[in-house]
Amino acid sequence: MTQQNEEEFFTHSFENLKIINFYFQIRSEWARGKREMVMISIIINQQISPEIEETMSLLCKKFSEQMQSNEDIYTGFYTYELNKHDEVDKERIIENESLIKKSVQDLYWETVEETRKKSEEEKITLLLNDRYIFESLEKMTRELKIISREISSYKDPPKANSDIRNSISNLNKMIDDLYEGFIERMSSLDIENENGLFPPDEEMDVEIKKSKKELLQVLKGEIRGDKD
C-alpha cells in the first residue's frame, strides 16, 4: 500500500494467476493525513490479453470515481471500531459499509460481463482470421461443378475415368482436413453459440444444403451412369 502516486494501476502474474490492482485515495475526516488509501484487486485464474487488461483498468477507474464521489463513503471502512462511535456515526458506518460492498459486488459482475464479451470478440476475431477455411470451401464447390460438367460429357460410366477418381479423392481429403481443422479450432476457442452467432441447420442456406448433399454423393461414389 506504500504508493508514490495518488492513483496507480498495476498487475502481478504468478503461474496461471493474473492479479489486477488499482490503488487510489479518497478524502477522509477520520484518517491520518485526511486520506484513506484504498486498493481494489481482481484475481483471474488465467493469463489475459492486453485488451482485457485495459477493460479491467477502466472498470477499476470507474469504481474509484464512484467511491470518490461520495464524500461520506470513508466511514464504511471503520466497522472495526464501531463501538467507539456514537449512534449517529454508527449508522453512517453501517450504511456506507453496505454501499462499499454493493459497489464491489457490482464491479465483480461488470468485470465478468465485460471480460466475457471481450473474450468472445477475440475468439471470433481469431476464427475469422481462418477465412481460408471458408474460401477453400468455395473453391471446392467450384471444383465440384467442374467435375460435374466433366461427368456429364462422358458416355461411359464416369468411374472409369482416372482423372475424376483422382479429383474425388483429392476433394475427399480436402474436406476431411478442413472439417477436422475447423472443429478443432472451434473447440480450442471454446466458442459460445450465443445470440444466433451460428445459425441452426434448418436455417442454413438452401444452396449450401444442396451443394453439401451433391458433394457427399460424389465422395461416397454414388455416381451411377451418365445422368448421375
Image (cartoon, rainbow, N blue to C red):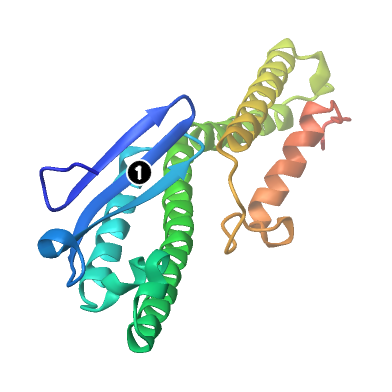
Of residues 128 and 99, the one nearer the viewer is 99
Which residue is depicted at the point 64% across and 22% down? Answer: 177
> Is 211 drawn above or below residue 183 in the view shown?
below
Q: Which residue does the image show at 16% across and 52% down from the upper left?
A: 7
Q: Nearer the viewer, residue 146 or 90?
A: 90
Residue 196 place in picture, x, y as percent: 59, 62
User: Does any portion of residue 109 appear in the rendered image?
Assistant: yes
Return the x and y of residue 139 as percentages of the image width and height.
53, 32
**Residue, disc 1:** 20
Check the picture and name the quadrant holding the N terminus: top left
> Residue reaching furthest bottom?
88
Residue 185 vertical placement versus 90 (above, below): above
Residues packed near mark 1 inside 10 Å, few (<14), some (14 to 19) or many (20 plus): some
Which residue corresponds to the image point at 78% horizontal and 30% vertical from the top-left? 218
- Please count the marks in the image: 1
Mark 1 lies on a secondary structure that is strand
Q: Is residue 124 left or right of residue 209?
A: left
In the figure, residue 11 lies in which quadrant?
A: top left
Outermost residue, front side: 84
**Residue 48 appears in the rendering:** no
- Where residue 38 sits: x, y (%)? 27, 56
- Left or right side of 31 for 216: right
149 in relation to 169, above or below: below
Say which quarter of the image contains residue 125.
top left
Amino acid residing under circle 1: Ile
Compared across the picture, whether 183 is left or right of 86 comes to right
Give the quadrant of the C terminus: top right
Q: Name the foreground residue: 51 vs 32.
A: 32
